[in-house]
Each structure stands twice: as structure tokens, then as C-alpha cells.
Image (spheres, helix red, strand yellow):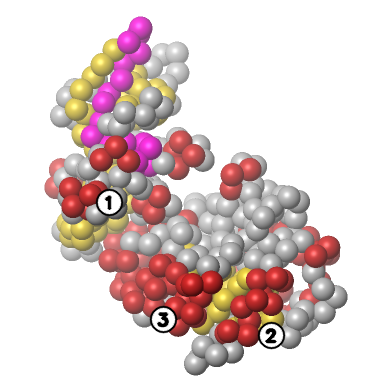
Amino acid sequence: MDYSKIPSTAFVLEEKLLRDNLSLIKNVQDQAGIEIILAFKGFAMWGAFPIVREYIKGATASSLYEARLCFEEMKTKAHTYAAAYVPDEFEELMSYSSHIVFNSVAQFNKYYPQTLTAGHKISCGIRINPEQSDVEIDLYNPSSPKSRLGVLKDFMPETLPEGVEGLHFHVLCESDSYSLGRTLIALEKRFGEYLHQIKWINMGGGHLMTRKGYDTKHLINLLKAFKEKYNIHILLEPGSAFAWETGVLTSTVLDIVESRGVKTAMLDVSFTAHMPDTLEMPYRPKIVGASDPDENSKNVYRLGGTSCLAGDFMENYAFENELHIGDTIIFKDMIHYTMVKTTMFNGVKHPDLCIWTLDNTLKTLRKFSYEDYKSRLS
């Protein structure tokens, strides 16, 4: 990717890297004999969906709008799950859905009769909580005993209600296959009696199979063994894995300010608006030509966002060279999750959305304007 040809600010997806991830994901799907679908909550850059559809056919949605996006841009009905369904939206939601998963038995009982009138087959399921997760950050851990997501074993009926064809769990976050293995042990311990009563099981997301060092062979063997044991269809719905390390966010140094020995490079991007997960998770984004400082580091700068939020900054990075106004700062791995969480807080300009194509040209999918900001409010 030629950074000199990319404007500031822009999210830029590199097509070759996306295709590399998609090839790996399709290989896992084919070797394991399962179905892997795209989770929009992690990657919803629909301008790239024609590429995704060459490898993967399905997607999962967590809202009416995501389900409609799936129907319109992935050209298929969605596997839909929401923590709670809005009554006024449910009829339209059904029209975009092939599967609907309910977060409680009460929600299933309320809405299942409506699914029988949808005009097409909707396969229904219930989300369960196996109470096992290796996720250490509570904000991203849906498997705690007091979680609002998924039914605990104590609240499940002895026999699944008529019309429940599948079960769903989602307890991982950027995890490896061994975490999934531990989860399956807990699943069988708590919910094993139901596994012979269902047609499919959705093992959720968090399977970061495209990360370097991930043991895909172990994942394939794990899934094949589980499928053969219970004779059920298995679905995975990773978000991060699809767009992991496939693109960047470009920015420019606007100013350099100093306060009591701390130099801050002020950028034309915002962490709270354009990279909110860096503050929410929190995680520290990697930057081209920069590293974590040590006692011998020179050219150390804090990076400041352009909004007025006091905490809109990242602590010190050590750069290879002294920074100057006008220098380009490239944030790595900014395509999964980051893009879907962006806001227009403070009216800061939203980055362009671009693809660096296989023929080494920049394709700009979207530029944002004042009207985009204004139309979000009234």
C-alpha cells in the first residue's frame, strides 16, 4: 500500500489482505464441514461485501438495521439475534431473517407464534450462558453468572419448547481454539442434555483464526469431533477474524504542544470519535514507525485527538524520527470493530472509507460532509 497516495483522514481496507483472511476462513469452513458467517458488529463495510460473498455466503445481525443490510448487501437473509426485540420492529425483522435467536425463554414464547406467519421458514433458537469464558475484561465478557446475555441452566426447561431448533452461545473475544475447547466442556456439562434435541448450534464469535499463531488445525478437529458426536450443524460468526490486520487509519500532525515536559502531537483524527475502542477496551493501537518507549527512547510523543474531550489521547509513543507538523501518522489494524463504532462527536470530520485494490489503486467508497453530521440530529 502506497501511503503517499492516501488522503488524511481515511480508513483504508487492503483488498489482498482481506482476501487472504477470507481464504483461510473458507478453508476452515470447508475442512471442518461447518458454516462460518460474517458478524456485522465487527465488520460492516458493505462496499467490500461483493468480495466477501465470493468466499462466505451468510451473515449475522443484531438489530433490524443490520438484518436489512444483510438482506440488501449480502444478498441473503440474516441469522438474527438481539438481546431483546422491539415489538413494532419484529414483523419487518422477520422479512430479513432466516434464523432468529431469542435471549430468553419468555422472548421465545412471545414471538415464536409470529414466526409461523412470516411467509417463509424461520428457524428459531435460544441463547444460553455456559458460564465459561477466558475473557478478562468485564465489558467484553458475556458469560458471567449475572450476565444479561443468554439463559442460565437453572432457568431452562427440562425439555426444549416446541419450535426451538437451535442453541446459541457467544463467550469468546479474540480467543484461540483452546478457549473454545474449554467452553465446549462447560457447555456439555451444563447443557449436554439439550444437544441431542437440536438441529444446529451457533458458537458465536471471538474465534480469531486469522491471527498469526492461531492453531487452525486444532479448531478444525475440535469442530469435526463435536459435529460428529451430536450430529448437528455448527455455525461460527466471527467479527474480528474477517478484517484482522487488513487496513489502516491515516492521519496528519496538525500541531505539537508541550506541557510540563510532555510533548503531544495533535492529530486530525479523534480517539473518542474515530477509534472509541482504544478508550473503551482499552487497547493501544500500533503505529507505523513507532513503538512503546523505554528509558533510552528519543522522539517520544503523546498523541492527541482533535475533539475537546480531555481524555482524547493515547499515551507516549517513541518514533523513529522527530515529528513535525504535516507528518503522516498511520494507525495499523483499524478495520475490524473500530469502523463500526465511530461517531461524529464534536462535529469532527469523519474519515473517508477506501479500499486499496488488487491493482494498487485507491478506491474511495465514501466521503462524509457537514450534511452527514447535521442529518444525525434535528
Q: How many numbered callouts?
A: 3
Q: Is residue 165 above or below residue 170?
A: below
Residue under label 2, please give it: 163
Amino acid type for the residue under numbered disc 1: Ser
- Give the x, y percent position of residue 174: 55, 52
Amino acid type for the residue under numbered disc 3: Thr
**Which tag, 1 or 3, sits closer to the chain's start?**
3
Identify the secondary structure beneath mark 1: loop
Residue under label 1, please give it: 378
Residue 125 in which image quadrant: bottom right
Q: Which mark is residue 76?
A: 3
| Mark 1–mark 3 distance (CA, rounded to whole Å) | 34 Å
Residue 331 in which image quadrant: top left
**Which tag, 1 or 2, sits closer to the chain's start?**
2
Is residue 309 inside the magenta stretch? no
Q: Is label 1 or label 3 in front?
A: 1
| Mark 2–mark 3 distance (CA, rounded to whole Å) | 23 Å
Residue 2 shows in the view: no
**Which tag, 2 or 3, sits closer to the chain's start?**
3
Task: Please report the bounds of the magenta region as a residue range.
Answer: 259-275
Task: Kindly identify the residue that appears in the image at 65 percent across and 76 percent down.
Answer: 110
